[in-house]
Amino acid sequence: MAGIYIHIPFCRRKCHYCNFFSLASQKLKEPFLAALKKEIVSTREYLGGEPVNTIYFGGGTPSVYRPGELQEVFTSPPDPSPEGEGGSVSRDRMEITLELNPDDVTEAYVAELKKTWFNRFSLGVQSFDDEDLLYLNRSHSAGQAVAAVKRLQEAGYENISIDLIYGIPGAGNGRWLRNLETAFSLGVPHISAYALTVESNTPLAWMISRKKSAPVSDEAQVEQFRILMEQARQNGFQQYEISNFCKPGWHAIHNTNYWNGVPYLGLGPSAHSYNGSSRRWNVSSLSKYIGGIDKGECIYEEEVLTDIQKYNEYVMTSLRTMWGCNLGKINYELRITNYELIGKRAAAFVQQGWLTENSGVYFLTDEGKLFADRIAGELFL
Ligand code: SF4
């Protein structure tokens, strides 16, 4: 199986913390879609014939387009999987996710959605508190976020995910707890929650450096991460990846495939691809992307992965999941022969209480989840 990720590089305005590749100007909306359709055709061989079972429209803000416009990317020209529409997987068994900004989810928008094959929605809520939303420079209100979820549910959609951000300066544990209570009360089966990160060259970094905002507090983020894990457990959610929580059976197949090393094709500027032996990343410039595709030029860079790189990536991603990091797979599938050395290093973290081990599979403990990158780094070859 394989997945397709499509990066829509437009937003209505830029959020203060964001360093994703996206533009507030939508001048090139039409040329971009035309280029995207050409890229789908020209890159179809990258997945080597694997049937596609997930498609993910992310960004940016895909909902700057009408749902029908996005769907048409696949119906004309045909689906990129080699066996035609959806490869060997029928549409109704595919997971097709659309990221939505809450203020775009109007009644008219949902009515149009119902005519398309999108069947999973990821809502960029970030917070159910208007003060937080103002601080982050989000384009929607808390009321619009709640209304968007309810509108999708009333239209019969169940597979809805909410994105939340914790550790916002000035928000405090009480506000974070209220955010989580609202999220769980809405009855969505999936929540992704991320600590606010201060990326360089963002308005947030500028605000903090000019003392126009309090700095982000590590202690507050740790406390709020602990509250998140506890609340998720109490509400029957599994933490299937450090930042991703779901009711049993409702994990995101597309994202889980990334962590399990399943191949994927990334389309659009700045999108990444992986096919088991190489990684590609498209140029992070919309004009170069469109111009390159029009001229039939290469718009990506590519790196062929060594066994060691594959191993390091496997450790980094698998440790973060509830399925853990498997020494047997490291030995037999990734062909790493000195796996005993890795076992010895991992055993030190077991003693420390940051990992547990079961039949050669290592899992992060709650405490270990606070140090996931450091632990993975120690296990790298
Ligand atoms: S909507 Fe998403 S991609 Fe767009 S600016 Fe905000 S965080 Fe970035």
Image (tube, rainbow, N blue to C red):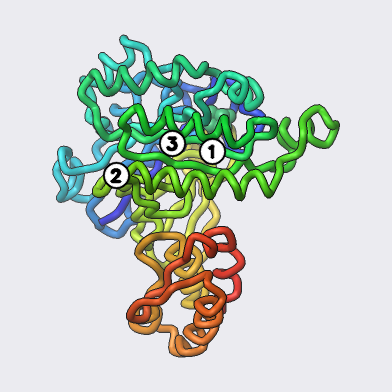
The answer to whether the residue labelled 2 contacts the one labelled 1, judged by CB atoms less than 8 Å apart, is no
Q: Residue at x 66, y 29 (%)?
A: 16
Mark 3, secondary structure of its residue: strand
The answer for how far apart the CA atoms under marks 2 and 1 are is 39 Å
Mark 3 neighbour class, 10 Å CA radius: few under 14, some 14 to 19, many 20 or more: some
The tag on residue 247 is 2
What's the residue type where badge 1 is placed?
Tyr
On screen, residue 101 versus residue 215, left or right, reads left
**Residue visible at 50% across and 29% down?**
178
Judged left or right of residue 113, residue 290 is right
Amino acid on which the number 3 mark rests in the picture: Gly
Between circles 1 and 3, the one closer to the viewer is: 3
Ligand 1: image quarter: top right
Residue closest to the eye, 55 or 174: 174
- At horizontal 46% and vertical 34% (from top left) the residue drawn is 180
Residue at mark 3: 58
The location of residue 27, given as percent across then percent down, is 55, 19
Pointer 1 residue: 289
Q: How many marks?
A: 3
N-terminal of the two: label 2 or label 1?
2
Coordinates of residue 317 in the picture (x, y in percent): 46, 62
Q: Is residue 232 visible?
A: yes
Q: How far separated are the C-alphas under marks 2 and 3?
A: 22 Å
Quote the CA–CA distance across marks 1 and 3.
17 Å
**Mark 2 CB in 8 Å range of ligand 1?**
no
How many residues crowd mark 2 within 10 Å: few (<14), some (14–19), many (20+)?
Answer: some
Q: Amino acid at mark 2?
A: Lys
Residue labelled 1 has its Cβ within 8 Å of some atom of ligand 1? no
